[in-house]
Amino acid sequence: MFFRYRGRALGFLLLVLSQGSAANVAEKSQQLLAVQSSIRILDHRVNEISVEKQGLINRLAMLEKSMGHSAARLKQLKKQVSQSKQTVLRLGVEIQSLLRLLVVQRERLQEQINAAYILGKRSRLKLILNQEDPARTSRMMVYYGYLNQARVAKLQAVKASLEKLKTLRILEKTHSEAFQSLVVEQTKERELLEKNLSQRQQLLMSLVSDEQDQLKALALLKADEKRLQQLFSEFQESMDDFPYELNIAQEFSEQRGHLGWPVSGPVINTFGARRSAGRWDGIVIRAEEGVEVKSVSRGRVVFSDWLRGYGLMIIVDHGKDFMTLYAFNQSLYKDVGDWVDVGDVIATVGKSGGRNTAALYFGIRDQGKALNPEQWLQ
């Protein structure tokens, strides 16, 4: 759109310069100055819109990072809420079981008290003074002792049960309050995520409305590719300083055709297929938002951040200049420098990078050159 404006201005300038002697030099000079002024204004506006667009892209990056953190936190909260709820339920069951035990203990204690009352009518003193049957007196004294010990034991058991009941009720109250706090936090986090989703949609609409010119789209894509190539060069230089682990079971180059899929789902964009500008240098796999993304091979994370055109992306270095790329993610679970094994969860599927639908971009690079991932996957 801006190139059309500039073209019109330049066309007007050529028209002015091509006019003959019908206009004097002074008039032509004034017209030339006016056209030059218009061109400067248009150039300034183009620069302003470029700055505005970069601002929108920066906001989109921050927003998608925030959404990634929110989604990860929601997943964590969901697990904590479930665990807290189970704890509260378990404590409730323990309390009910203890209450039933207390009923039984109190009944038995009452039986002991009744028995002691009946026997108490014949006091120890009477038994001792009654010397008619010393053997029977001795047996009764022993029975008295056992009865007293049993009564004391049951009293202690009741006391211990009451103390445990008190502790359990305190724990139940504490966990119930913690559960309610987690539910409130979960609600707030979900509301924040929904708010960010709405803002993201508005940003995408703003970006799309400004992105009508295919030449600009192609230039952006080439800039993204150049930025990615620059990243690969930086990674290769920086990783030369790291002693690579020697316990990798199999060289990456030997795993061609045997790699597991990072996510399950249909390939909606194949390697080399046409896109809005240029061709795909990887594959795009359709999957539900939030599905776990897994590393296809052992390696070291060399990039874990937002990159224009790719959104939240993780790049894993597998040694010997082989790297795998996982983009459009919702959340990133690994940091730069982390080692990952085959099947480790490194991210979750998302729509970052300005996508409308959830999917995973998966790419393979050898010395920075894009390879067809489907030839490497099982």
Image (cartoon, rainbow, N blue to C red):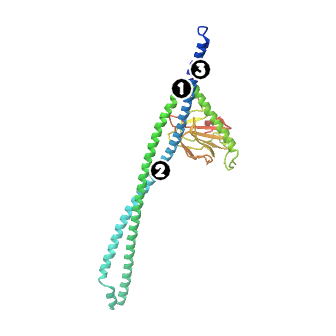
Q: Give whichever of 213, 157 is nearer the camera.
A: 213
Q: Position of residue 211 (x, y in %)?
A: 54, 28
Horizontally, residue 117 falls left or right of residue 304, namely left
Q: Earlier in the sequence, mark 1 or mark 3?
A: 3
Kindly identify which residue carries mark 2: 79
- Tell me: residue 123, above or below residue 78: below
Q: Secondary structure at mark 2?
A: helix
Label 1 Cα neighbours within 10 Å, binned few <14 / some 14-19 / many ≥20:
few
Q: Secondary structure at mark 3?
A: helix
Kindly identify which residue carries mark 3: 36
Q: Secondary structure at mark 1?
A: loop
Closest to the camera, between mark 2 and mark 1, is 1
- Tell me: residue 30, above or below residue 199: above
| Amino acid beneath label 1 | Gln
Kindly identify which residue carries mark 1: 212
> Is residue 65 among the parts visible in the rendering?
yes
Query: Cα distance, mark 1 to mark 3?
Result: 26 Å
